Image (tube, rainbow, N blue to C red):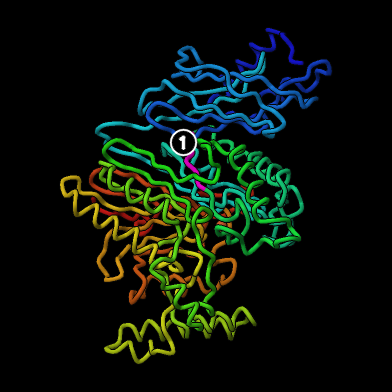
Amino acid sequence: MASQDTSRRSFIIKLASVSGTLATGSILSACGGGDESSNMVQFNYGVASGDPLSNKVILWTHAKYQNSNDPVALRYEVATDVAFANVVSSGVAPPAIEAASFTSKVDASGLAPATDYYYRFTSDVWISPIGRTRTLPTGTVSEVKLAVFSCSSYAHGHFHVYGEASKSDAQYALHLGDYIYEYKDGEYPSATSVVFGRNVLPANEIVTLSDYRIRHALYKSDVNLKLLHARMPMIAVWDDHEFNNDTYMTGAENHTEGAEGTFAARKAAALQAYHEWMPIRTGADKAVIYRSFDFGNLLSLHMLDTRLIGREKQLDQTEALSTLAGQQAWMSPSRQLLGTTQTQWLQNAMGTSTAKWQVLGQQVVMAATWLPISVQTKFQAYFASPNASTVGSIIAEVETYKTALKSANPATYLTAANPVVPYSFDAWDGYPAARETVLQTFAGVAASQPTIGKKLVVLSGDSHNAWHTNLTLANGTKVGEEFATSSVSSPGWEAYFPSMIPTIKSLFQDTTSKSNVQWMDASRRGYLKMTFTAAQAKGEFIFVDSVTNATYSVQTPAAAETRTYLG
Ligand SMILES: [Fe+2]
């Protein structure tokens, strides 16, 4: 069991102080290595905080005895200073036990609004790394800064994006899903594309509770992710890969019922591991994660679950376009992405909030992103046979399309046999009635409360590319704007069409017949920094130049990469 050696304790405290908020979990192992007699408590995955409110925040850690699976008794401390001279909240945290894969979460309360705090866990003489967190503001709020992330595939690259954001002036992190990926080693990415040293554990596709736990632990071992978690609180929602690809309410593309057990059992395993390993406030039902965060009178953040709780099965394009049943399902006024319970909750949340900015933090791209069949056919030809000729055909067809749109009569090109169609039926484009309901609701709320001047911003991920779009009702009326972040490391279009990036960018950005894309980026990994004031919502798209190299440089946003929605 742990030693009572006080000199060791002071040594640890000294190290912890020096390490400050950038501690990454190496403190204890650094000083315990040569002592055979001790069974030290290790905090190998650092600390994290999340789901801040104005008076409380979730604190998370993982603690395990080096040489046993005994429960680890834990206490937590929250202080206003990094030396912990002024502790304002402390107490017993749930012990780290094997049945919770040695993780522990506590809801630290009694905190003041809009305040930075330092926190740590202790077990006897052992002390965790120190984290910094922040509560939400109340009342009149002048500015809020969020760092928004999506799609972090461990094997595809280094998490430079997390490390970079941890050095930024963002106050709160938002993760919109695909925090982990479920694939086996060598599947996505292929064995030859795995970034050196970043093969996944376990090597198999994750299916069981043990698998999901091991995968979460692998991700939490990443030094840049530890830095981010130690630096600011995270508000997270899952997307599909926390379960398996293209999840919906009762199944998923990447789940084989029977051979991989039941979807219900797999979902339960993924849910348990998620709640063990993420700094999220866990309620009675682990499947319910939609929730709101109020930043005074400036901003209400409504985090949604578009993936699991209410999503009907995705249609594929052939189904949606070529069969009557598919067409009817796609266009059905009752087709669900959020489900009716969550939709009603959101309607109420947007209506009762008194904040100016109504912000939806959610997984998949909401704006219409369409392309004509004629262009899509050329892409399919490329996939069947990638060569200079098929590349040239895509580029030529996109130019023809753009020329037709600028012509006096685009209908001669966009005929009944060549309509524009969504590029993804997994995004809101596959659920048009659900999108219209949300946007109509917001329009109604804004119109009925003119003194607040409510504005809608939708934050999205999933696509691995960056977007800034207008959100319009079916009748074309603009009701808000969408800022969709690129991925932390998962590949964008540059991985598939390296020679066609300008063409893809112009395909979406310069064609406004159905799409409302103001700007997009098809080739770079990064995060989105959102700064909200009463005057504007500003989105800065911050990219790194490489995730496959161990070193990188960050790219200061060009003028076009700083996008503004005026309040
Ligand atoms: Fe993803």
- Magenta span has 174? no
Position of 64 with respect to 128 (left or right) is right
- Residue at the spot of label 1: 51
Which residue is drawn at the image coordinates 60% and 50% (left, top)? 242
Q: Can residue 555 be seen by looking at this rendering?
A: no
Nearest to the observer: residue 100 or residue 551: 100
From the viewer's side, name the closer residue of 128 and 562. Answer: 128
Task: Point out residue 542 in the picture as x, y percentages from the top left corner.
Answer: 45, 51
Relative horizontal placement of residue 111, taking residue 250 as reference (left or right): left
Q: Is residue 469 above or below residue 287?
A: below
Q: Residue at x 43, y 87 (%)?
A: 418
Can residue 79 be seen here?
A: yes
The magenta region covers: 232-237
Look at label 1 and name its amino acid: Asp
Report the residue that reaches farthest toward the bottom. Answer: 412
Left or right, 476 with respect to 560, comes to left
234 drawn magenta: yes
> Element at badge 1?
loop
- The percent position of residue 174, horizontal first and vertical second, equals 46, 44
The relative height of residue 125 versus residue 24 in the rendered view (above or below) is above
Residue at 64% from the left image edge and 42% from the top image edge: 273
Q: Name the residue at the right extreme.
A: 36
